Image (tube, helix red, strand yellow):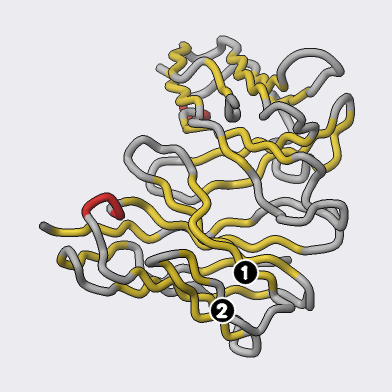
Amino acid sequence: AQTVTQSQPEMSVQEAETVTLSCTYDTSENNYYLFWYKQPPSRQMILVIRQEAYKQQNATENRFSVNFQKAAKSFSLKISDSQLGDTAMYFCAFMKMNRDDKIIFGKGTRLHILP
Amino acid sequence: NAGVMQNPRHLVRRRGQEARLRCSPMKGHSHVYWYRQLPEEGLKFMVYLQKENIIDESGMPKERFSAEFPKEGPSILRIQQVVRGDSAAYFCASSKSGTGASSNTGELFFGEGSRLTVL
């Protein structure tokens, strides 16, 4: 069974700083997706960034980038130039590829961006 | 282009009553997933449905919970004889072609959730 672990329940950083959220996962699969989802106070789940395991290049999306270490099964999210609107719960998630399957979520990291 | 629509947004039930939560997937999407989120917890998978078929219900409690996605109309998550422990936010997500080889993104689109409170 796949598991996703986020070891930081809560973090706070000053606006404009860079912050890194940690995520590790466990799987015996070779092909899979990894995701970071954001859940602001409105509770809507929003996809932040996606990584395909077969791609060596780390995904980037504007101020958001990941550090994907497949051998270490690590998938951290870096937010550069953090903004007040980045305040939210962030969930790391895993999904097998090449067969219909569900997304498995970690327990989340609550991120506070301080003015 | 409407996203995933869930209703009601908030539902209050007394112990023993039934709760029905509805989810209309995005236009063109035929795959629906239900997740439950307890306070301060991540999302826990409950069930994955395609039109008229349950594909994976490994996360559904064995009793009192059921889900359907009929040929016409929204997907329904039904909780019979609710108990206080059922209080949670229930999220629906949809995708166009599942998350398997036929999908080129693996992305799910989420609704805003339905918050169930059991008194």
Residue B28 quadrant? top right
CB atoms at circles 1 and 2 under 8 Å apart?
A: yes
Lower position in the chain sequence, tag 1 or tag 2: 1
Residue B4 quadrant? top right
Q: Nearer the viewer, residue A33 or B10?
A: A33
> Would residue B47 appear left or right of A106 to someone viewing this image?
right
Give the residue displayed 70% in from the left and 20% down from the top: B76
**The label number, if any, that marks residue A51 in the structure image:** 1
Provide residue B96's location: percent of width, then percent of height.
Answer: 77, 39
> Are discs 1 and 2 located on one and the same chain?
yes
Mark 1, Cα crowd under 10 Å, few <14 / some 14-19 / many 20+, is many
> Would residue A21 appear left or right of A67 to someone viewing this image?
left
Give the residue displayed 73% in from the left and 66% down from the top: A1
Q: Is residue A88 above or below residue B52?
A: below
Q: Nearer the viewer, residue B29 or B113?
A: B29
Image quadrant holding the C terminus of chain A, namely bottom left
Provide residue A89's location: percent of width, then percent of height.
Answer: 37, 52
For label 1, the SS is strand
Mark 2, Cα crowd under 10 Å, few <14 / some 14-19 / many 20+, is some
Q: What residue type is disc 1 on?
A: Gln
Q: What residue type is disc 2 on?
A: Asn
Provide residue A86's location: percent of width, then percent of height.
Answer: 30, 55
Label 2 lies in what chain?
A
- Badge 2 is on which residue? A58
Q: Is residue B86 above or below residue A10?
A: above
Provide residue B71's location: percent of width, then percent of height.
Answer: 86, 18
Label 1 lies in what chain?
A
